[in-house]
Image (cartoon, rainbow, N blue to C red):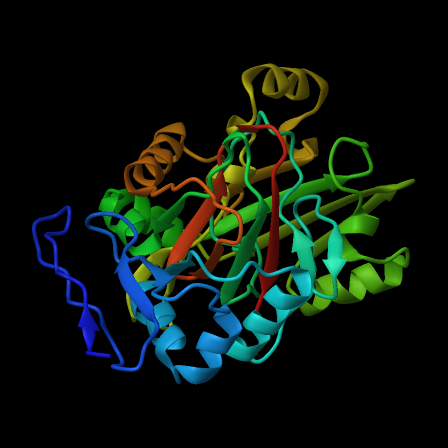
Amino acid sequence: MTNQTTAAPKGRFGSSRKSISVSKDSLVRVDPLAEGSRAVMCAPTVAGLDAREWLSSSGDTLARLRAEHGAVLLRGFTPLDAAGLAELATALTGGLRDYDNRSTPRQRVDGNVFTSTEYPPDQTIPAHNEMSYTASWPSTLFLTCLVPAAEGGETPVADSARVHSRLPAETRERFERDGVMYVRNFGHGLDLSWQEVFQTEDRDEVDAYCANNGIQVEWLGGERLRTRHVVQATITSRATGERVWFNQAHLFHVSSLPEGVRRELLESFAEDELPRNAMYGDGSPLDPEHLAQIRAAYDAEEIALPWRTGDVMIVDNEQFSHGRRPYSGARKVLVAMA
């Protein structure tokens, strides 16, 4: 089989993208995921190819694609179940991590493979880098679609370096100087319980975890707990050396909620008692204009393809964010974190 390359179409900013080369014995075609995007799609040139077999026979091809392009969609391979996804992810990265310091409801399916966030289907999950509200995050995400939605339900991805570059310098500088403070209040029954977030019933274990991870803890009586955590707003991607936008300020902020829910919460709670909220790292309120700029940058960079049964998306969590669009019908997507 001859060496294969894809053409190099013009990027959305006018520059040509590099050709993508794969080895001469490759059984996989590699194409851009969308015009002007670094992300790519890999599709087998023969029927019945298992992604795990391709990984084992193609050397560092998949690892190179992940590092160079940030997001890789595997489409047309033999579908994987939860155990198969774990095998693929472990073979590529060496191991999976648990979902600790949780932020959203998920169910454990098999080992460290989980359902994707189980928010109601009519809700949008804004673009975010996984666990960027912490100081310790997974480097790579693996998602696979077992059942695509009847309509909608895409998992958009966005280039975090491009999001960063779209923001005004003044906005970037404010966030980079102060970081982001995430404030969470547990015990109201309106969000995850602290027992679910920290996966324990033992308050001493919560205290120890938070102390080890720089999280401020305040027990308020009964089951009520307040945590504050100041972490990064941007980081330097380990794969590319680029500065990338890397936080969930716009997602945690009360303004991300549907208008009716937001109004009811603000009528019931002081801002520091909301189930979750975000501020600048110095504790001052986020500027609504900054939040609007962040959301606009994500909207401008998002790429969304409808899921197909058996699709696997591999995402460098520092290079690309992801989200979820509303959907109808059944939808089942699994996720593993490396």
> Where is residue 226 shown, x and y percent of the image?
74, 44
In the figure, residue 32 lies in which quadrant?
bottom left
The answer, for residue 99, to whether it is visible in the render is: no
> Where is residue 210 shown, x and y percent of the image?
72, 61
**Residue drawn at 30 percent across, 70 percent down:** 68
In the figure, residue 212 lies in which quadrant?
bottom right
Of all residues shown, which one is farthest toward the front?
A: 47
If the image is split into quadrants, where does the C terminus sit? Answer: bottom right
Instruction: Please count the marks in the image.
Output: 0
> Where is residue 48 shown, x and y percent of the image?
48, 65
Q: Looking at the picture, tell me which residue is in the foreground, 49 or 107.
A: 49
In the figure, residue 304 lies in which quadrant?
top left
Height in image: 253 above or below 1?
above
**Residue drawn at 44 percent across, 60 percent down:** 315
> Where is residue 161 shown, x and y percent of the image?
29, 56
The answer, for residue 327, to whether it is visible in the render is: yes
**Residue drawn at 34 percent across, 43 percent down:** 303
If the image is split into quadrants, where does the N terminus sit? Answer: bottom left
**Residue drawn at 92 percent across, 40 percent down:** 222
